[in-house]
Image (spheres, rainbow, N blue to C red):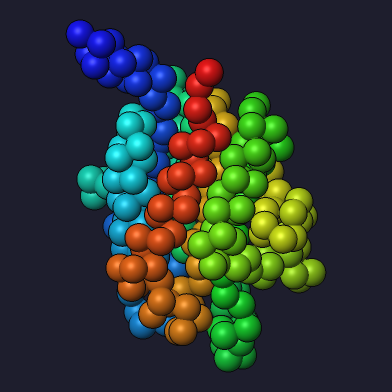
């Protein structure tokens, strides 16, 4: 009986996390140096993050995994009662940088939050937890999106943790829950792309992200 009661208590405290796979098969996002599209990388990593969250007893809803196209605005609305929304992506660079052969100049993760999200402070706290865990796992931030060029120049909230403010990111500003978008690495960089495709790297990244999301959504 005691075990059953404890089990019920654990379930009652479980967080409800939305894990969004960036892009869709119809709109696959960036193309990696090898020609493999971003959506495939996002699908692999988001699946591993969801698996690890469920292993931590969190309730998980996955978005954009059934092959159907889904609008950005609709993604957070799939689970309005969730505790947290995280969107998993992999990064590119502007075409001019790629054409100039500058793909290897940047590697690493970037994390984004929006001040237009109604739960901005909690979003930022979770972003910081994700950044800390990625650093502890041996990853490093890419500061590409903070470069002072048209189309980038995103305000850096925390340089050490690679956290940027991007207020108009649709999935973040339209979420009613705290929300964070993670760019796990730069797939147009051929060296980084190879590493990001390695199952061991996927496992490491997923574990770091999932643990941070789980801990910052613990209920008293």
Residue located farthest toward the front when viewing the structure as drawn: 2
The N terminus sits in image quarter? top left
Q: Percent from the top left, x then y, of residue 121?
A: 69, 32
Q: Percent from the top left, x then y, of residue 181?
A: 54, 48
Q: Which residue is pictured at 31% across the width and 37% down the height?
A: 54
* 20 horizontally vs 123: left or right: left
Q: Percent from the top left, x then y, of residue 57?
A: 33, 32
* 193 horizontally vs 146: left or right: left
> For this rendering, which residue is in front, 128 or 6?
6
> For this rendering, which residue is in front, 63 or 2?
2
Q: Which residue is pictured at 34% across the width and 72% down the height?
A: 197
Q: Percent from the top left, x then y, of residue 133?
A: 55, 53
Q: Which residue is pictured at 73% across the width and 64% down the height?
A: 146
Q: Which corner quadrant of the image does residue 201 belong to?
A: bottom left
Instruction: Relative to 117, say whether 106 is above or below.
Output: below
Instruction: Relative to 143, say whether 116 is above or below.
Output: above
* 157 horizontally vs 139: left or right: right
């Amino acid at each position: 009986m005691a075990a059953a009661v404890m089990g019920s208590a654990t379930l009652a405290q479980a967080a409800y996390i939305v894990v969004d796979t960036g892009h869709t098969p119809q709109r696959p996002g960036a193309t990696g140096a090898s020609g493999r599209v971003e959506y495939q990388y996002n699908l692999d990593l988001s699946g591993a993050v969801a698996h690890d969250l469920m292993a931590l007893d969190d309730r998980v809803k996955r978005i954009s995994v059934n092959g159907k196209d889904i609008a950005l605005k609709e993604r957070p609305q799939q689970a309005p009662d969730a505790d947290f929304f995280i969107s998993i992506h992999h990064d590119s660079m502007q075409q001019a940088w790629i054409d100039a052969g500058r793909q290897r100049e940047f590697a690493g993760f970037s994390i984004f939050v929006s001040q237009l999200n109604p739960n901005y402070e909690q979003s930022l706290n979770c972003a910081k937890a994700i950044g800390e865990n990625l650093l502890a796992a041996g990853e490093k931030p890419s500061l590409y999106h903070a470069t002072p060029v048209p189309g980038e120049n995103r305000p850096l909230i925390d340089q050490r943790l690679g956290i940027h403010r991007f207020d108009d990111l649709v999935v973040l500003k339209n979420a009613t829950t705290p929300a964070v978008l993670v760019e796990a690495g730069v797939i147009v960089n051929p060296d980084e792309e190879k590493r990001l495709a390695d199952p061991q790297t996927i496992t490491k990244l997923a574990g770091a992200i999932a643990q941070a999301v789980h801990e910052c959504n613990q209920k008293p």
